[in-house]
Image (spheres, rainbow, N blue to C red):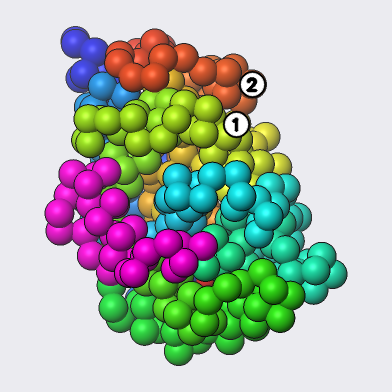
Amino acid sequence: MDTMQEMQEWVESLERRARTRLGNGRVADYIPALAQRRADQFGIALCTNNGDVYCAGEAQESFSIQSIAKALLLTLALRVHGDTLWTRVGRNPSGMPFNSLTQLEVEGGKPRNPFINAGAIAVTDRLVSAFATPSKHLRDVARRLSANPTIHIDERVQASEWRHRDRNAAMAYLMKAFGHLDNDVDAVLQAYFSCCALSMSCVDLARAFNFLAAGGYARPLGEQFIAPDLSRRINSLLFTCGMYDAAGDFAYRAGLPAKSGVGGGIIAIVPGCFSVCAWSPALDECGNSVAAQYVLELLADDMGHGAGALLTTAPASGVAPWWPRPPSSRASR
Ligand code: DON
């Protein structure tokens, strides 16, 4: 059996085992347009640093990327503004729900990190200052990174978020009152919601975020998208803050830099090797997909590596130095 076939069988075995967790959790309904998804949907796609994609389940089905957009927003804002971005947003775990207002008030309107809602809104404000149409810019970057020109913003989801924007608007106004937002609150919120409402599949997302596995090199663009040290730093933030107040738990279980969204998707990075996206709409109480977290835990477990080993990384691009053990030698769980 050749290695590509082994990889494909491995991804299929991950899918089979993860399906045992379907039926746990709840589909997000605080954005009504998201509530229409079936809880038993599941997909996974893995993109190696040499550009090969392996997938199983509903990996081609598009879903609302929601907070996964925050990782791309941060990347673009750091490309434009560099380290000055950190005057507007911190780099520490929040230990609070992603839509918490409490910390913001106590800490002078500076959000703890770019992955909670307030932090992503502050980052979006920096992009509104830099680009005439920031959400179109982000959409175009997503299209190019995933080599899929059909990626679009789901206007129904965007409108639903706008109609139910009360908490996010409260955060934005609070930051504006503290002088941490330069632009009109409505313009910033519209841009933020549009980016969260991007509709992408597991395959699109695994491809789009591969640059974080490849030391900043984006194979679909044929260029160094961000510097290797910036890629390493973004992975560190994903590791410590990407799963909200469950970041510590997820780090313990899977040991991978990751970013979740309330649409049920999670992207995770194995630096030097591959990017992976898993999707299933039913969420736990922290807003993270139950089955997607579980499959990433299985994946990490199969690889037999700890978090520390995964974060000290290898080549900027090229053939993955790591390869899984053949499916037959792994215990099924
Ligand atoms: O602003 C919101 O609430 C959503 N657009 C994004 C939240 C989200 O995805 C949190 N993720 N787990």
> Quick check: is 130 in the magenta stretch?
yes
Expressed as whole percent of the image width and height from the top left, the position of residue 251 reads 64, 37
Q: Locate residue 68: give its quadrant.
A: bottom left
Q: Is residue 208 visible?
A: yes
Above-or-below relation of 327 to 269: above
Above-or-below relation of 257 to 68: above
Q: Is residue 297 visible?
A: no
Q: Kindly identify which numbered label has been placed on residue 308.
A: 2
| Disc 2 to disc 1: CB gap under 8 Å | yes
Give the left or right position of residue 278, taking residue 254 as reference: left
**Mark 1 = which residue?**
255
Secondary structure state at the residue bearing disc 2:
helix
Expressed as whole percent of the image width and height from the top left, the position of residue 13 reads 34, 31
Above-or-below relation of 8 to 247: above
The three-letter amino acid code for the residue at tag 2 is Gly
Please state the total of marks drawn on the protein image: 2
Whichever of labels 2 and 1 marks the residue nearer the N terminus, that label is 1
